[in-house]
Amino acid sequence: MKASTVSSTAAASQPANQINVNAPRKSFLARFQRWEWMLVALVVIAIVINSRLTPYFLNAQNLSRTSADFMELGLMMLPMVFIIITGNIDLSVASNLGMCASFMAVLWNLHVNIWIAAGAGLALATLGGLLNGFLIAKVKLPALVATLGTYAFFRGIAYVLLGDQAGRGYPPAFTYLGQGKIPGTLIPFSVGLFAVLAVVFGLVLHRTTFGRYIFSIGNNENASIYAGVQVARIKMTIYIVSGFMAGLAGLVLAARFGSTRPDIGTGLELTVITAAVLGGVDINGGIGTMPGAVLSLLLIGLVRFGMGLKNVQDQVQSIAIGSLLILSILLASVARTISASGLKFNWRNIATAAAFIIVFAAFFFFFFWSRAPVLKSVFG
Amino acid sequence: MSEYVLELKNIAKRFGGVEVLHGVSFGLRPGEVHALLGENGAGKSTLIKVITGIHQPDGGEIFLNDKQVHFDDPLQARLAGIAAIYQELSLCPDLNVAENIFLGRQPTTVGGSINWRKLYSEADRLLTSLGVHLDLKAKARSLSIAQMQSVEIARAFSLNARILIMDEPTSSLTLKEVAELFGLVRRLRDEGTAIIFISHRLEELFEVADRVTVLRDGSYVDTRLVKDVTRDDLVRLMVGRTISNLFPKQDVKPGEIALKVEHLSLAGIFEDINFELHKGEILGMAGLVGAGRTDVARAIFGVVPPTSGTIQIEGRQVEIKSPQQAISLGLAYVPEDRQLHGLIPAMNITSNISLPILKEYARRGWLQDKAERSAAFSAARQMEVRANSIWQLARTLSGGNQQKVVLAKWLSTKPRILILDEPTRGIDVGTKAAVHALMSNLAAEGIAILMISSELPEVLGMSDRILVMHEGQMTALFSRAEATQEKIISAATQTIKTVRAL
Amino acid sequence: MTVKTPTASRSNLLLTLTRYREFGIILIIIILAVIVTLRAPVFLTLGNFRDILLDISILVIVALAQTMVILTHGIDLSVGSVIGLVAMMVAFTIKANPTIPLVVVVLLGMALGAILGSFNGLIIAIGKVPPIIATLGTLSIYRGMIFLYSKGYWIPPFQLPDTFKLLSKGTFLGIPHIIIFAIVVAILVYYFLNYTRTGRDIYAVGSNPDAAQYVGIRKQRIIFLVYVLTGIAAGLAGVLWASRFESSQTNTALGFELQTVAASIVGGVSISGGVGTVPGVLLGALLLGMINNSVTLVRISPFWEQAAQGLLILIAVVSDILIMRRVQRNKSK
Amino acid sequence: MKRNTFYIVLSAVAMLSILLSACGTAATPTTSAPAPATSAPAAKRTYVLVPKNLGNPYFDAANTGAQKAATELGVTVLYQGPTTADATAQITMLNALIAQKVSGLAISADDADALVPTGQAAIAAGIPVVTWDSNIAKGGTQLFVNQADTQGIGDSQVQMALQITGPDGGEIAILSATAQAPNQNAWIEVMKTDLAKPEYAKLKLDTIVYGNDDDTTSYNQALALIKTYPALKVIVAPTSVGIAAAARAVKDQNLTGKVFVTGLGTPNALRDYVKSNIIPEFALWNVPDLGYLTIYALDAIASGKIKGNPGDTFTAGTLGSYTIAPDNTILLGKPFIFNKDVIDKFNF
């Protein structure tokens, strides 16, 4: 380096506490942030509770079958982690999934070879990702706005393509993607695919220049631009990848169903985002790990499967998932606030808290009262 | 009954683990202009935010007219008669001029709804009395920085406060505007308002202040009557010691032309900028905040490419469209705003330093930890960054150390042309001197340096030549020998074109 | 690229037109209206206009509230679930007490909505949870509560008294009540945002939160308030929904939140806060309603409806941002 | 640091309680967990009646019949479905049911094709699968309990339309559920064929629109129909959601007596409209009987009485004896026409 010694006249004023070169970087496990450990704990707890509550849980066949139900989510979640770390979002993934699967189905119905049809579907989904990337990186629309538009547009294209038709009768070689198992094991092929891709995405995020740029963009986009990071190109790339992965998820889902209809995968986008955020990916960008996201997907799967075994309705299951999501962020932020400034017990805060408690209690009283026939006859 | 309208006793304030105010005491008399003096980072702005209720003190007491007060938020301070103009501009960009003036206390009718007519007429009256001419319905976003500052001043004045705090109100005003402002300040003082005044320009202080309190490193140093002190006294109080050589500029014989800029323009921002920068030369760029200096630097560095004009690097004409391209051409740019453009606060020192040339530490995209680490380490050590390890997060460092990290980052790209934008803003004197020494050494090694600075002593002390800008135009170019403070100020505030032949 | 100063007159014309951000969307509305009318003259009849208004009344009520949230740089994804939950609770209450006065029903719905909204406000303003996460969570929670509450049953039309159905269907001076509700809400929100200090504080908080705090605006309260207001609006919408559709189901207003966001955004509300007007949002909702209406009228295959809607949203926001950018460039000359 | 540890513990406890309470309340919305084993004695056998979605009165009515059968047979019938008519959700739920090794599944499919692998998996796991209301495509089921044959339903729709318009005929339009619903599409095909016949020549089919079995969408589609086709006389809506929404649209537009609605629906939801002559008549099979028959058929297979092959015969309680047709279906009976005179005899 050219910068030679710094003039000592000025700098000698205070003893410099030199950087210690030997100070070890925190080991991987130690850097594995607290939230990941928390998720590990929750996963263990969920496994214990599930196996206590129902004898059907610890059954390889059952676990194998149910694990495949969450792989489309997982495939879409991987690039979503990238996108959220850059401080953006993609609401269009599930619609893009539908567009890919529908395009493939249309071609299949026209007697195109299934692999060519699947490739074309993937290409269209990738193109969809490109459109998102263009709107966000070049036109500079806010990601939420752009993908809200394409969310409607892509799903619309799926309907235009397939209308009231369905794609069905896919050859076994194709349905293997969603229904097959890795030979000699009970592990569904889609789970294996997800595992491999999760490792690849994890390595890219944590071990490559590209991953480093993703974090730097999410932390400080402006400073990244000044440091010569090609922000627009990277954003474009991750949206294209997101499109491709949504397409892949579309193929896997179509293969699992053995058929395609244009409404395939509707509404999955919110679950995908939930999984990423529950995994510790900061919605404001800059923070997140791939292991965390994968663990959170596992947790969601376990909670849903466990509750499903206890015959809890899916909407009621989502109360648990929604609460986990809010609590995961809320507790961290409350802890931060308290450790920064302490709890203030003045009369105003206590009165406010009391008011909230009374109001919410009143709500729940009404919630139960207005349904209960006994009380109705008393008050009615 | 004490003599003070506002009295602070032993105010302490911590941010995270860092104590930034250590028991500061301070008394403000009615009808005085009391200057608050200290280097960047001495705690002036924090102290002011404690007074106005933005921050709550961790220790000490505040008395207002002998009654102890505690402000939970700025509203309570405002209702108690305290108004402030903050250093960072605090307008709402999407609201118009008139509303920004009366934000949070718009005049209302009897029924409680906002009386827009009255709001505009009062805003008009106020601005007229301040001698400012602005479109009342223009959105704040569309104003120049000087205009924004006028709006802030109008807002503070409109409060009819008993205590008025002005944190660097003049940093982007022209001489004429400053004179008008001082007229108003004196008028208010004579009407009994107590005024706290902060400025980096010592001359201004002598012109307008009655007493001066000096802070250093978050501690109270002394309070003096302005008429009893000299400039040198104040500098000594501020710095706490005599700095033997704050500007260790070595004489370097300029080499060949490294950067040549001709007729450079960015539509609506600046136009027709011409200069040459030689190897081994430090070219200072002076001017008011908002004069367009940073925009010129950003244009050269490819952040916002110029709309016309040419750039030659080492005799070769180039078109720089992105910072990445600029870096590969041997340019480096240490930006003005560390937090916004310089640093990735939530990443560690290593990642920050390696970011511009990350590809050099990677094989086919895969990061090679060892190479990155050793390069970052030697860069950090060379800059004498004080930290526990190179894995410490950048945001946990002090301002001076953050600036060193940013410098280390850019020097590790081995630039041939270095653009420094306010390289010593907000850092302590020790680091400042170190940065100046570094600049001098770099120049001696043949690196061409373009330095933007709003601190005239720095410009005068470090530059071989000085370019002055005003409102997007180049108004003067002085050699080191002919430059004086007065000449630069006059060129920076007047639109007379006095570009000299090189 | 060399940019020459555009002639003054041209830039002035553009400026004056686009000083009103609604310019772009009005243009799109006119173009769409002309095209549709050419294909289906019935489009330009008073009756059809009335039907469009009927269709967007609930959207307008909630989108205006959503706008207030977006103005503070927030978002409320839970409105659809709030509407559903309130509709369900109100419907069950009425079914049990058919004689309950309508005023009480409306107030009850708004109160329930306010409570649900205040829960959002609490975790966002006090708990500092990012709005998108908080309301994504309550979107699931409230929707699940509908199911817990109703135990999977629905309220069919015949279980609701006629008086309740008339709450939305009845007419006053020939105008259906539901449209009057929307107009009243629009006027109230317009007044609130433009003629009260609290309303202006919402803009200030969204435009520059620190600056707002410096001048003494209580940021947390404002943020809490907008979510409560949105809850109230969604509560009212829930009552009207149950009345208009004469029933309440577990999937009532499922996915409605994205429509309200779309109406705001198309109406020129900036997702980053501080920018947006009531007339703009009304036009945004009108455009969405017109798209729905015209796709069926023009007898395009119904499968094109969603694609057309998505495309028009994209066109509206892209053209808006391009116009604004050009204006800014010209202005800075 | 200490403090942080404390909060981690705190939040772990909070999360745990969420999980626990979620699982704890698990059993409340439904009956207790099913007992395992297929060949268990009758008292322990647990069947699951799976509708397209919950909260739909049509399926709820079927459930009343199913529960009646359960009482007679001495078995348990759970009523479990997704909260929206969505194949993805239905499959996830079915996987959980298969995992519990329930004694039998009676499914109304949200998607005929997408459910094939799941149906196959259930059969492979030794769980009998019977479909009702909406079939699963080949291989995914052992038996389909058909509410009424496609031909009969299609015919009834066109007949009712002509009945309403009178011999002079007029314009009609179809408001269907989703474009993907297999039974809807089959009926519509029959209707189109019928309309081509000379006896229905006076009926002119304007268009087919889809309300997605969503009340709002159906309502808006009906409104659009009324507006687009001023001469429209009858809206035929062979879906319980669509018919109610269409009737409401007619009422709201004050077109009672000008535009009529008919189709398939449930009596409770349509009672008011039948009485006010917006829906002069509509058709439906006896829905509780459908649930009743389904459970009897499932029990016959699950208990090993029949194999579920064509030609097998079993007795379904009060409904009498049924024989499985060559296409592996059994037919409940002819659709029933509801009008002003008979509607008050039914309550479902």
Image: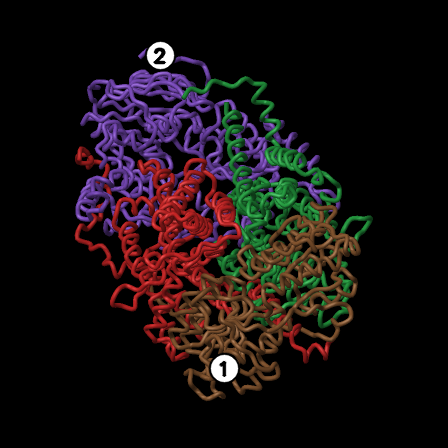
Chain colours: A red, B purple, C green, D brown
Q: Position of residue A249 (x, y in %)?
A: 38, 54
The one nearer the camera, A149 or B368, is A149
Q: Position of residue C184 (x, y in %)?
A: 73, 49
Q: Which residue is mark 2?
A: B500
Q: Is A267 drawn above or below residue A161 in the view shown?
A: below
Considering every residue shown, the one lying at the far top of the view is B501
Mark 2 vs mark 1, CA separation in Å: 106 Å
* Residue B392 as seen in the image, left or right of residue B62: left
Kind of element beneath mark 1: helix
Q: Which residue is mark 1?
A: D300
* Residue D94 as seen in the image, left or right of residue C27: left
Where residue D316 sits, quadrant-wise, is bottom right
Point 49% across, 67% down: residue: A314
Residue type, numbered disc 2: Arg
Q: Position of residue A105 (x, y in %)?
A: 43, 51
The one nearer the camera, D233 or D11, is D233
Quadrant of the frame with the N terminus of chain C: top left
Q: Residues within 10 Å of mark 2 (few under 14, many from 20)?
A: few
Point 53% across, 87% down: residue: D74
Where residue B153 sits, quadrant-wise, is top right
Q: Chain of mark 1?
A: D
Q: Mark 2 against mark 1, which lies toward the viewer?
A: 1
Q: Residues within 10 Å of mark 1 (few under 14, many from 20)?
A: some
Would residue B307 be seen by someone viewing this image from the given angle?
yes
